[in-house]
Amino acid sequence: MSQLAKLQKWLQDTNTDVAYISDPINVNYFSGYGSDPEERVLALFVFKDADPFLFAPQLNVEEAKASGFEYDVYGYLDHENPFAIIAEKIKARTKNFENWAIEKDNLSVIRYQAIKTFFPTVGMTQDASRFIEQTRLYKSDAEIEIMNQAGADADFAFQQAFAAVKTGVSERDIMGQIEYALKKHGVMEMSFSTIVQAGANAANPHGGPSLDLVEPNELVLFDLGTVKDGYMSDATRTIAYGTPSEKAQDIFKVCLEANVTAMDKAKPGMTAAELDKIARDIITKAGYGEFFIHRLGHGIGKSTHEFPSIMEGNNMELQPGMCFSVEPGIYIPGVAGVRIEDCGHMTKDGFVPFTHTPKELLTIPLS
Ligand SMILES: [Mn+2]
C-alpha cells in the first residue's frame, strides 16, 4: 500500500474527513513532491471520500505538477490569502469536512487560526503527527535502497575527510574540503552541518568545527551526513593523526567494542532499551560510563532524528524495516572524545548498516 493510501485508510478507520499535512517533510513523504516553502504555505489535503490535492506557492506549482503527483495542484500568489483559496477548493471538493486531522507537532497557531476563520465549526482534534511517526517508523524496500545510496555518499565523504588531515589545517578547512568534494560528487546537501573535531575539542559532542589546527598525535572525529532523494545518511568515524595518548587509544578501543557488539547483537524483538544497555554496559565496565552522555542512537529516514529512539526507558521492540543509528561515544573533558556511528536497518536476521567505512583505528602518518 502506498504511503498516501495508508493515510486515506487511516482517515476512513478514524472517521476523519480531512487531513491537513503541513510539515514539508511529510508533504513530501505522502505526495512525492518535496520543497522548502520557507515562510510560504505548502500543504497537502487528503480526504476520506475525495481525491487529495497539493497546495503550493504559485512559483512551485509547475514543479509540483511535474513531480509525479497524480492529483490537482493549486497555487497562490504572494498577495493572496492562501487559506481563502484552500477553503474554496475544499468546499468545492466535498460536503464532508467536519472532522479534521492536523499535525499537532507542526501546524503553527497562526495557521490553525487562519483555517478556523474559514471553518469556524469544524473539529480539529485528531492528531496526524502520531499516525505519521508510526507510519514513518517502517521503511519500505525502496526507501532502504535510497538510504543505502545515501550511506555510500557518506562513505565517499570519509575518504575525502581522511585525505584532508594534515598538520596546520584547521577543522573548518577540512569541513570545507569534505563538503566541496561532495558537491563535485553530485551531493546537493548535507543532512546537518559537518562536524570535524580534533583532540580535546571532540569531548564536546556537538561542537565545532573550529578554526583550531589539527595537531600531531591526536584523535580526529568526523560526524557527517548527506541527503539523497529526501533521505538522510549520518555516520561518525574517529581516526588517529600520528600516535595519540594511551588514554585516547583506550577510549577508542572501548567505544569500538561497544559499537561493534551492539550492531552484532541487535535482533528483531529486542527493545530499544535493551540495545542501549548492551553498549552502555561495555563502556561502564571499562570505567567510562559517566562519559557516555547521550542515548545509543536515534531513528533516521526523511529526518536525521526520528523514531525509534535507542535509549533507556524506551520499550519499543525493534522490528524489520526500522532504521536507526548505533553511536556510542566517550567524551573526557580536556582530554579526548570518541564516537563511532553507523546507521542501518533492522532485518529478520539482524542489523544491516548503510555505511561500510572500516572502523578499526586508522592511523594517518604525520605530514
Ligand atoms: Mn547520529
Image: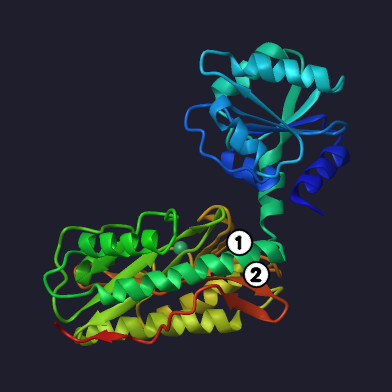
Amino acid type at circle 2 is Thr
Q: CA distance from mark 1 to mark 2?
A: 7 Å
**Residue 54 versus residue 344 in the image, above or below:** above
**Residue 342 versus residue 120 in the image, above or below:** below
Q: Secondary structure at mark 1?
A: loop
Q: Residue at x 77, y 21 (%)?
A: 90
Residue 245 in which image quadrant: bottom left
Q: Residue at x 72, y 12 (%)?
A: 120
Q: Position of residue 28 (x, y in %)?
A: 63, 44
Q: Quadrant of the C terminus?
A: bottom left
**Residue 209 versus residue 77 in the image, above or below:** below
Determine which residue is flagged by label 2: 271
Q: Which residue is at the front of the view, 298 or 22?
A: 22
In the rendered structure, the answer to whether residue 297 lies left or right of residue 331 reads right
Q: Position of residue 38 (x, y in %)?
A: 47, 32
Q: Quadrant of the N terminus?
A: bottom right
Determine which residue is flagged by label 1: 314
Label 1 neighbourhood size at 10 Å, few (<14), some (14-19), many (20+)?
Answer: some
Viewer can see residue 161: yes
In the rendered structure, the answer to whether residue 273 lies left or right of residue 163 reads right
Q: Residue at x 36, y 70 (%)?
A: 290
Q: Secondary structure at mark 2?
A: loop
**Tag 1 and tag 2, C-beta contact below 8 Å:** yes
